[in-house]
């Protein structure tokens, strides 16, 4: 019995337990200051509360080499949070009658009928909702060791692979779904996915600090990203992912939840039927949490720039975020 207890204690995630049970600071800034104790090089938090100017909190470093402190206005690779923009773009194309949620992958890309299992049964709706069964290209062997440089190379990784499950019988997060949706947007509009997003989402909301890739920005404006045990700065790696400031992302999340990003209730209803209103993002070097909290009418964005897929790193990021939200709730109710 004693041996079993000792063994079980060995596997307890003590860093997470310690972070959870620590006394809650009185202010968000005090909590943010603990980021380096959690193992993060740097952190940016933006709180966008209705009726107030956005509040920014930072700690740690923007860049290890220069020792430059975290800058609240730095650009950050938002990883999978970009799926929200893609889903909105799909909803807008459906609203305009340019796409059908119930047409299949094979309808739009006949050349994939023999390369992606069930392509003639997988609908656009299923891809948006991660119910397609299409394998996730980032789950292929050693993907992040040698990431691919474009969508064609990424898609090639899963061609001719068996489906993970029959269409619409299960849920499994797959970046391949959104790669294909990006290709679909480009096929229907005749322009790049980001250009369409810029025209129908960013420009109307006056979001000038959101970009399609590191190719479109001054790298000095990008927050550095690090992987535990790997010394190089990962901000120069072109993952083909969007970047945004915390302020721009907060404004988008508010517009999404308030409905301002949609033309009318009908367009919003299309979106609501297919996707969610918050997201997280995780790639080597970059973690993002972007959520709207209705009880406080506040958007809280958190960027942390140190990642370790093998440890409790993501859990600690979520603990940090949860504690920040708890502090805000206490302040809001007082």
Image (cartoon, rainbow, N blue to C red):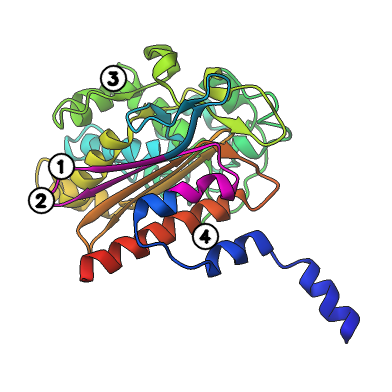
Query: Residue at horizontal 47%, vertical 31%?
Result: 179
Proximity of marks 1 and 2: CB atoms separated by less than 8 Å: no
The span picked out in magenta is: 33-58
Q: CA distance from mark 1 to mark 2?
A: 21 Å
Could you give the CA–CA distance between mark 3 and mark 1, rounded to whole angstroms? 18 Å
Image coordinates of residue 4 in percent, x first then y, are 86, 80
Marks 3 and 4 sit apart, C-alpha to C-alpha, by 34 Å
| N-term mark: 4 or 1 | 4
Q: Nearer the viewer, mark 1 or mark 2?
A: 2
Measuring from the top left, give residue 216's x and y in whole percent. Answer: 37, 13
Given this view, does label 3 or label 4 mark the residue nearer the observer? 3
Residue under label 3, please give it. Answer: 195
| Local SS, label 1 | loop
71 relative position to 328: left or right: right
The residue sitting at 30% across, 16% down in the picture is: 191
Residue holding disc 1: 262
- Residue topped by disc 4: 169
Magenta-colored stretch includes residue 41 = yes
Q: Position of residue 207 (x, y in %)?
A: 21, 28
Query: Label 2 vs label 3: CA separation?
Result: 31 Å
The disc, 3 or 1, on the residue closer to the chain's N-terminal end is 3
Nearer the observer, disc 2 or disc 3? 2
């Amino acid at each position: 019995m004693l041996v079993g207890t000792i063994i079980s204690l060995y596997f307890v995630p003590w860093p997470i337990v310690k972070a959870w049970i620590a006394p809650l600071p009185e202010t968000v800034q005090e909590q943010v200051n603990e980021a380096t104790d959690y193992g993060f090089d740097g952190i940016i938090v933006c709180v966008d509360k209705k009726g107030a100017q956005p509040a920014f909190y930072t700690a740690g470093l923007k860049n290890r080499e220069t020792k430059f402190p975290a800058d609240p206005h730095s650009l950050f690779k938002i990883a999978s949070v970009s799926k929200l923009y893609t889903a909105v773009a799909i909803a807008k194309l459906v609203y305009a009658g340019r796409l059908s949620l119930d047409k299949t992958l094979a309808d739009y890309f006949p050349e994939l009928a023999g390369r992606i299992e069930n392509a003639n049964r997988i609908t656009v709706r299923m891809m948006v909702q991660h119910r397609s069964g299409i394998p996730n290209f980032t789950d292929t062997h050693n993907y992040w060791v040698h990431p691919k440089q474009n969508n064609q190379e990424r898609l090639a990784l899963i061609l001719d692979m068996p489906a993970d499950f029959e269409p619409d019988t299960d849920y499994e997060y797959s970046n391949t779904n959104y790669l294909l949706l990006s290709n679909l947007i480009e096929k229907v509009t005749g322009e790049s996915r980001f250009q369409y997003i810029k025209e129908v989402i960013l420009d109307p909301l006056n979001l000038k600090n959101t970009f399609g890739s590191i190719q479109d920005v001054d790298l000095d404006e990008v927050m550095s990203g690090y992987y535990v045990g790997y010394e190089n700065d990962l901000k120069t790696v072109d993952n083909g992912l969007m970047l945004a400031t915390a302020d721009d992302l907060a404004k988008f999340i508010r517009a999404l939840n308030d409905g301002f990003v949609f033309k009318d209730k009908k367009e919003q209803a299309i979106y609501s039927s297919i996707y969610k209103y918050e997201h997280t993002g995780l790639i080597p070097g970059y973690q993002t949490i972007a959520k709207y909290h209705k009880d406080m009418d506040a958007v809280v964005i958190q960027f942390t720039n140190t990642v370790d897929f093998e440890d409790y790193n993501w859990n600690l990021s979520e603990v940090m975020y949860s504690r920040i939200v708890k502090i805000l709730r206490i302040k809001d109710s007082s």
